Amino acid sequence: MEFLELIKSQVAESIKGQIELPKEKENSVVGGIGDSILGGLKQAAGESNGLERIMSLFNGNTAASASPVTKMIQSFFVQQIAPKLGIDSGLANTIQAFLPTIIDGVTKKASSDKNVDLVAVLTSLAGGKSGGSLIEKAGGLLGGILGK
């Protein structure tokens, strides 16, 4: 399963029965939440220690609720995605508050799904840069942790 597909399926699964979405906007909101997770991860990857924070989140060393990466994703959702979706601020705030639960599900699923190459995901988030870089270190660490 591709990482984006995994995110969107996990988002749909996580919010089912937890957040009431308007039927006509359900698909766009689920997609928007997925886009905010990817956008926040990309933003975090570009910051100092960003990849280390992402690795800590995916390997379970940092809870999603306490991760600065989650806070970036929440901010990305509220500032970039929610206005484009045309949802009211109450729903946007509900989704923002629920994002740590969604991210926790995504990281657990990504870590356990043998078809998701987290090294490739990290490389993609960092813009494909490697060559003795943190990406290679991240790949080694994640590979060891996840047995990949």
Image (tube, rainbow, N blue to C red):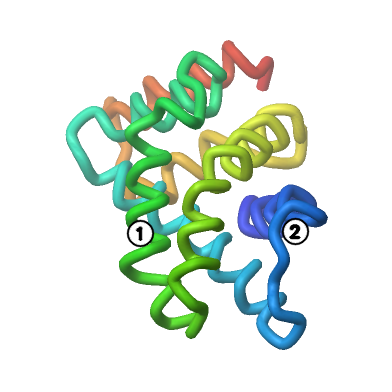
Along the horizontal axis of the image, is 27 left or right of 145? Answer: right
Residue 113 image offset from top left, x and y in percent:
76, 35
Q: Residue at x 21, y 40 (%)?
A: 47
Residue 20 higher or lower than 85, as above or below? above
Q: Nearer the viewer, residue 141 or 40?
A: 40
- Tell me if mark 1 has few (under 14), some (14-19) or many (20+) residues whose alpha carbon lies within 10 angstroms of its own: many
- Residue 67 drawn at (x, y percent): 39, 29
Amino acid under disc 1: Phe
Q: Compare residues 35 and 45 and report the one nearer the observer.
A: 35
Looking at the image, residue 14 lies above or below residue 85: above
Q: Quadrant of residue 82?
A: bottom left
Residue at the image point whose x is 76% and y is 81% from the top: 23
Is the residue 63 above or below the residue 135 in the image? above
The residue to which callout 2 is attached is: 12
Question: Badge 2, how many Cα within 10 Å: few under 14, some, many 20+?
Answer: some
Residue at image position (28%, 26%) is 132
Q: Secondary structure at mark 1?
A: helix
Q: Position of residue 123 (x, y in %)?
A: 42, 43
Evaluate whether residue 1 shows in this view. no
Q: Nearer the viewer, residue 26 or 110?
A: 26
x and y, in percent, of residue 65 in the image = 48, 30
Residue drawn where x is 45% and y is 40% of the image: 122
Residue 136 in sight in this render: yes
> What amino acid type is highlighted by mark number 2?
Ala
Q: Is residue 80 left or right of residue 141?
A: left
On residue 85, the disc is: none
Of labels 2 and 1, earlier in sequence is 2
Q: Is residue 68 above or below residue 82?
A: above
Q: Which label belongs to residue 76?
A: 1
C-alpha separation, residue under disc 2 versus residue under disc 1: 19 Å
State the quadrant of the C terminus. top right
